[in-house]
């Protein structure tokens, strides 16, 4: 599509169909609304003629959902739009690529964008060019997607783990802990990120590779009744937990009694109390003072 094929017109907002809707950051969206209300629209949205017009929508939105919704909030009924000649498939790809190429985007945007581009026959190099990522990074994402590793892709995207670790985990599924240890030893994971990555792998092992599996597993757990064995196991676990709490409470109580007794003895020493008053340290928490009063 060339620039000569595009034209800018005022078109009714009600005639625009949002082809690829996404959730917006409320604070960023508020800033867009404020900016448009104050200085106007700096850049028109991009639309293409819609092939199916049964619902009264004449255009598919390609780029500019935030600007479109901000115009609606401002009470506008029409918006400047650049009308291009593109098929619905091309428009969807362009919309997804724009979302992925943004500085801040959700991990799911990258997943959807790369999956769609791969489905359209683009290779890693071509996808990298369109999204602004390196070919190596996209190849890694494609490898993770081929194995259904949505959880690892998401972790890579938000910086929890390096993509090299995610790839090693996929290529050597039986050596996850070794891959994790190597990433720590080579400095790819710091102490805090190491613990985060460790928890991530535990969650992945427990809930599955994809977020859909996690939701499905939770639903199944809610639907399946507990067996007698599971009930007894849960009961024993709760009993042991309460015993542990009781032991800890008793230990704290013994320490508190020792502290009260020690303070009581020290307060009987005249020199000690004089020194405390001289240093303005003769006050104490009310609860502790009450305990000492009861000791007398």
Image (tube, rainbow, N blue to C red):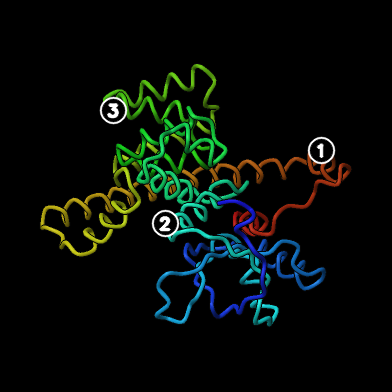
In the rendered view, does 142 fall on the left or right side of 237?
Answer: right
Which of the two discs, 3 and 1, labels the residue nearer the N terminus? 3
First reached walking from the N terminus: tag 2 or tag 3:
2
Residue 156 on image: x %, y %: 48, 37
The answer to whether residue 134 is above or below residue 73 is above
Label 1: element kind: helix
How many marks can you see? 3
Mark nearer the viewer, 2 or 1: 2
Marks 3/1: CA–CA distance: 69 Å
Q: Is the C-beta separation of discs 2 and 3 under 8 Å?
A: no
Circles 3 and 1: CB atoms closer than 8 Å: no
What residue sits 56% from the left and 65% below the top? 47
CA gap, disc 2 to disc 3?
36 Å
Badge nearest the viewer, 3 or 1: 3
Relative depth, front residue between 246 and 161: 161
Q: Is residue 105 left or right of residue 119?
A: right
Residue 266, position as x, y percentages in the image: 70, 40
Residue 187 in the image, given as x and y percentages of width and height: 54, 20
- At 55% from the left edge and 27% from the top edge, which residue is drawn? 190
| Crowding near the residue tagged with mark 1, few <14, some 14–19, many ≥20 C-alpha atoms within 10 Å | few
Q: Residues within 10 Å of mark 3 (few under 14, many from 20)?
A: few
> Which residue is located at x 51 percent, y 71 percent?
59
Residue that label 1 marks: 271
- The secondary structure type at the circle numbered 3 is helix
- Name the residue carrying label 2: 89
Say which residue label 3 marks.
Answer: 173
The image position of residue 256, as x and y in percent, is: 55, 46
Q: Residues within 10 Å of mark 2 (few under 14, many from 20)?
A: few
For the residues labelled 2 and 1, the Cα–Cα distance comes to 89 Å
Residue placed most toward the observer, 274 or 250? 250
Closer to the camera, 224 or 256? 224
């Amino acid at each position: 599509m060339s620039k000569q094929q595009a034209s800018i017109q005022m078109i009714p907002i009600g005639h625009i169909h949002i082809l690829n809707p996404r959730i917006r950051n409320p604070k960023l969206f508020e800033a867009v609304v404020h900016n448009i209300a104050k200085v106007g629209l700096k850049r028109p949205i991009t639309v293409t003629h819609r092939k199916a017009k049964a619902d009264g929508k004449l255009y598919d939105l390609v780029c500019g959902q935030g600007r479109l919704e901000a115009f609606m909030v401002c009470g506008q009924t029409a918006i400047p739009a650049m009308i291009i000649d593109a098929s619905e498939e091309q428009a969807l790809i362009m919309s997804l690529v724009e979302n992925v190429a943004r500085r801040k985007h959700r991990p799911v945007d990258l997943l959807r964008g790369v999956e769609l581009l791969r489905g359209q026959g683009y290779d890693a190099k071509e996808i990298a060019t369109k999204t602004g990522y390196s070919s190596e990074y996209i190849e890694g994402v494609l490898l993770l997607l081929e194995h259904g590793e949505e959880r690892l892709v998401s972790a890579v995207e938000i910086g929890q783990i390096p993509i090299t670790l995610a790839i090693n985990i996929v290529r050597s599924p039986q050596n996850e802990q070794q891959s994790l240890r190597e990433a720590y030893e080579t400095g790819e994971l710091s102490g805090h990120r190491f613990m985060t990555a460790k928890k991530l792998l535990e969650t992945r092992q427990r809930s599955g590779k994809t977020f859909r599996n996690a939701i499905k597993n939770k639903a199944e757990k809610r639907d399946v009744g507990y067996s007698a064995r599971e009930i007894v196991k849960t009961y024993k676990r709760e009993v042991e937990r309460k015993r542990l709490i009781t032991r800890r409470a008793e230990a704290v109580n013994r320490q508190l009694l020792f502290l009260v007794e020690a303070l009581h003895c020290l307060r009987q020493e005249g020199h000690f109390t004089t020194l405390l008053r001289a240093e303005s340290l003769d006050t104490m928490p009310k609860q502790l003072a009450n305990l000492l009063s009861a000791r007398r």
